[in-house]
Amino acid sequence: MPLVSVVMPVHNSAATLGPAVRSVLAQTHTDLELLITDDASSDDSMDLLKELARQDERILPEAAARQGGAARARNLAIARARGDYIAFLDSDDMWLPTKLEKQLAFAATAGTPLTFTSYYKMDALYAGEAADFVPNGRVVWAPEHVDYRAMLVHDHIGALTAMYDRRVVGAKPMPDMPKRQDYALWLSIMRDGTPARALREPLAVYRAQRAGSLSSNKLALVPYNWNLYRRHEELSVFRSARALAGAAWHSLRKSRI
């Protein structure tokens, strides 16, 4: 069975960390390592991680020397990865039990190193485990196939569902950006013409409307998207503006789910 390295950044996530970690450990595909970087939390996150790690040797927590943001936290975990595949989950989201099993089977025949799935949305105050989650009508449906041009208009890949083949891509880090670093990573993988393909079944659960999150305020993401288009992708002003308009429209549609 392929080994999957699961990358999880943590910062002051004690309230939601347990269910997120347990949703990984409960996967029907059991050959995995959970690489967690605590990004200088000031709450009990690291103590909780140490306790969870004592209970399951697949949990491999590490404390960052200083707070560096989500990209650096993820990259510290990616640098430790030994898996055939690298997958991502934030510390307030969850995977459904068959997520890895089904996505690995799909990836084996997808013909591309980058795959993703559809996912559910749950309320910010949801306090249950992944096994308790009752499927609802709030589904962000993944398109079956996206290429680089389509991704420039909108980030179709939910980071909590993304998985790439490390044997093909290498241990590819995320660009060190304050926001949109996951989007930048997908684009860097796809820039040479590599497509991404999706298993359209919803296999993860995203915690929507997170308090204090920039993603809850779509206008706040505009400068980060602009920076991504202009500096990271080196698009012209015209192409950047067109991409930004498309991203805003798609983001508004998704926010209504």
Image: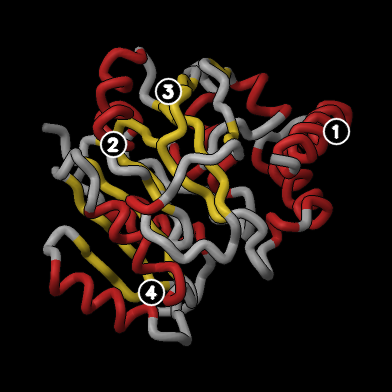
Q: Is residue 35 left or right of residue 92?
A: left
Q: Nearer the viewer, mark 4 or mark 2?
A: 2
Judging by the rendered image, the residue that carries numbered circle 2 is 98
Mark 3 neighbour density, 10 Å: few (under 14) some (14–19) many (20 or more): many
Mark 1 neighbour density, 10 Å: few (under 14) some (14–19) many (20 or more): some
Q: Is residue 111 left or right of residue 228?
A: left
Q: Earlier in the sequence, mark 1 or mark 3?
A: 3
Q: Position of residue 255 (x, y in %)?
A: 73, 44
Q: CA distance from mark 3 to mark 4?
A: 34 Å
Residue at disc 2, secondary structure:
loop
Q: CA distance from mark 1 to mark 4?
A: 37 Å
Q: Nearer the viewer, mark 1 or mark 4?
A: 1
Q: Earlier in the sequence, mark 2 or mark 3?
A: 2
The residue positioned 47% from the left and 18% from the top of the image is 194
Q: Nearer the viewer, mark 3 or mark 4?
A: 3
Disc 3 residue type (three-letter): Leu
Q: Position of residue 198 (x, y in %)?
A: 46, 23
Judging by the rendered image, the residue that carries numbered circle 1 is 245
Q: How is the image coloured?
A: secondary structure
- Residue 53 found in image quarter: bottom left
Judging by the rendered image, the residue that carries numbered circle 3 is 199
Image position of 177 with respect to 27: above or below: below
Q: Nearer the viewer, mark 2 or mark 1?
A: 2
Q: Earlier in the sequence, mark 3 or mark 4?
A: 4
Residue at disc 1, secondary structure:
helix
Q: CA distance from mark 2 to mark 1?
A: 36 Å
Q: Position of residue 178 (x, y in %)?
A: 62, 60
Q: CA distance from mark 1 to mark 3?
A: 27 Å
Residues at marks 1 and 3 touching, judged by CB atoms closer than 8 Å? no
Disc 1 residue type (three-letter): Ala
